[in-house]
Image (tube, helix red, strand yellow):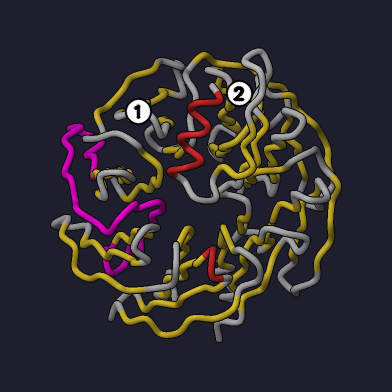
Amino acid sequence: MSGTKIGRLASAFFLILVGFRAVPQSAEPSVALIGRDAIVNNPDNRKTYVVDKSLGAVVIIEPSGSTKSIKIGKGPEAIAVNRRTGFAYVANGGDNTVSVLDNTGTVVATVPTAARPYAIAVDGLTNKVYVSNIFSSMLTVIDGTTNTATNLKAGSFDSIIVDSDKKRLYLTHYETSTVTILDTETDSLSKVAAGGMHLWGIAKSDRTLYVTHVQDSSVAAINLDTHTVTTIATGKMPCELAVDEKPGRLFTANYADGTISAIDTQNFSVVGTIKVGKHPQAIAIDPDRHKLYVANTQEDTVSVIDTGSLRLEKTVKAGKSPYALAVDPTTHKLYAANLGETPFTQVAIN
């Protein structure tokens, strides 16, 4: 990835790339990344994992609320968990590795990646971990049984969604107009048109894949069986997506105008627009309580929305620059990943 490309992403993408500086062409650009999966909850073991970028660690939050910090690799960016095994996988952008933590929080392996890892996802059925690498066209595939890695030439990607049942991987990149589909049985690749350029937010519901067009202020609803695309207008610069399945609604966080668009997933129509804080960047849903949580990164707050009535209920403090969110579906506690010395905040939503 060239310095010019990173510069464009930095200007378009608020906090996603920060601290860019020019370097000679022969050197890898120096960037500071923040990941949408910097904090995740495993509903099976009820643990929440959050990266601590400043200390090169991952903080494990137990169901009781107690925490422990585990030293891992340099510059952790994103985490994925395997619900079947209880293992967690942390992409370390500072030293091109993935740290493997078992169910007790012990680091049991450090696996090298092809280049600088960013997005990471787990296929629980096959026990494989997929890692995209910036500055590389190689997708690193980790065998969860042996913790050995192979590299597949697939392209550079910003996001990964695993469809275990269909044995597919869906991958997107900001500067393309297509979704790449990897057949995880054969490793064959295909591409599907996404209806526009500059893809970022991604979500899947049943047989529909949703992808945001940041500069076009719209979302593409891609039928994964027919590959037809329905384009849905949203607020300005939609950057993140979340689905509440029971009412059948898709939500987009619209960074540039401080709104949330609510979309009916049956007829792909916008059914509401909710004003939140300045520059919403991350969203998460508590499906049992039908609450949508919105991280207003530049205001240090989280907004709470009822997904049924589409009413903004309140906005609360959430630590410095909350940029990723995770909900414990059992305790209904909300955690935010923060920039700065304190890696996370338990948000007082009740």
Disc 2 element: strand
Residue plotted at (46% across, 68% down) = 294
Q: Report the magenta residues as a range.
A: 221-249
Judged left or right of residue 319, residue 242 is left
As shown in the figure, which amino acid type bears the numbered disc 2?
A: Thr
The total number of labels drawn is 2
Judged left or right of residue 211, residue 162 is right
As shown in the figure, which amino acid type bears the numbered disc 1?
A: Thr
Q: Position of residue 160 (x, y in %)?
A: 47, 37
Frontmost residue, 49 versus 157: 157
Frontmost residue, 148 versus 2: 2
* Measured Cα–Cα span from mark 1 to mark 2: 20 Å
Frontmost residue, 126 versus 9: 9
Judged left or right of residue 79, residue 3 is left
Label of residue 176 in the image:
1
Label of residue 140 in the image:
2
Label of residue 226 in the image:
none
Q: Position of residue 184 (x, y in %)?
A: 46, 24
Q: Is residue 281 magenta?
A: no
Quadrant of the image containing the N terminus: top right
Residue plotted at (59% across, 64% down) = 322
Disc 1 element: loop
Q: Position of residue 126 (x, y in %)?
A: 55, 32
Residue plotted at (48% across, 27% down) = 5
